[in-house]
Image (cartoon, rainbow, N blue to C red):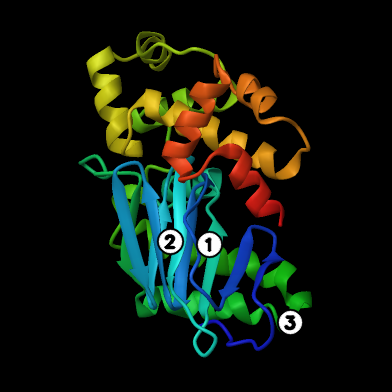
Amino acid sequence: MIKKHSGPDYVTDVLPGVRLLKKSSLTEPLGGLAVPTFAVVAQGSKCTVIGDSVHHYNAGEYLVVSLEVPVSAHITKASEEEPFLGLEMALDPTALASLALETNLAPIKHDAPSSAGVGSVSDLLLDPLVRLLSLLDTPTDATALRPAIERELMWRLLNGAHASIVRQIGLVGTPLSRVVDAIEWLKHNFAEPIHVEELADRAGMSVTSFHRHFRRATSMTPIRYQKRLRLIQARTKLMSEQRSVASIGFEMGYESASQFNREYRREFGSSPGIDAARFRT
């Protein structure tokens, strides 16, 4: 599915919204914010943790994620002889919703159990994947051929094993879309104190209903989602900015440096100062 390139490891943005990954060694868990994504493993294995849900996927399997959620991911099988090889493709919510409406797809009658799932790459999925990757060798063809290939990929996902997850991407008027609205607010106000009652009111739900739908979608509570979002943003700033740990902690909404250090160590396994120094070297 993905050519076994020789040479150094890489993460390559080969086409807008598509990344190829190669790694010849295991990696430590690294936190980040996932967007709606279709991720395929061609060789090796990977593990992605979303809240309390752990997703292992191996060669010939894929992970689909329908929400912007904090994740922790690491490669669990790779070597110099057989490096990890993978592909990630961002899923456009508007394009998925338009395709579902255009083709009159019947709505899923039950809520998806979560915002992510692992499945096997079927022959129906493999065929457009191979054609998408072939555009790497003929980039001049990408403008003309890529839209139709990605449309076919989206169609296969909309009708595949995790259709209930994929079909909720981009749809409005559903409990999940209200959770998405709350997540958008959290992304832009993660440093502010939050109250679940206010988030539920924004989503037009009762507190009980909002809490249930939020946890089902993200595998975590709204408070935990905000905390992980703060820590991921803090880690990004620690890696990219020459600033004190305390100043970044205060910017993220922490009331004291000790609280920031304690929660950071609990999340990432080391203090923010040690973590930043290790990544910079």
Whether residue 110 sits left or right of residue 146 in the image: it is left
- N-terminal-most mark, 3 or 2: 3
Residue under label 2: 155
* Residue at image location 27% in from the left, 36% down from the top: 216
Tag 2–tag 1 contact (CB < 8 Å): yes
**Residue 131, horizontal then vertical, whole percent:** 57, 79
Question: Looking at numbered disc 2 in the image, what kind of residue is underneath it?
Answer: Trp
Q: CA distance from mark 3 to mark 2?
A: 24 Å
Label 3 SS? loop
Q: Which residue is painted at 55% across and 86% down in the image? A: 80
Instruction: Decide: few, some or many residues near mark 3? Use Cα within 10 Å; few <14, some 14-19, many ≥20.
Output: few
Q: CA distance from mark 3 to mark 1?
A: 19 Å
- Density class for disc 2 (Cα within 10 Å; few <14, some 14-19, many ≥20) is some
Tell me if label 3 and label 2 are in contact, CB under 8 Å.
no
Viewer-nearest residue: 101 or 280: 280
Q: Name the residue carrying label 1.
A: 151
Q: Which residue is mark 3?
A: 138
Q: Nearer the viewer, residue 160 or 216?
A: 216
Q: Position of residue 154 (x, y in %)?
A: 47, 60
Task: Describe residue 2's horizontal placement relative to residue 277 as left or right.
Answer: left
Query: Which label sits on residue 121?
Result: none
Q: Amino acid at mark 1?
A: Arg
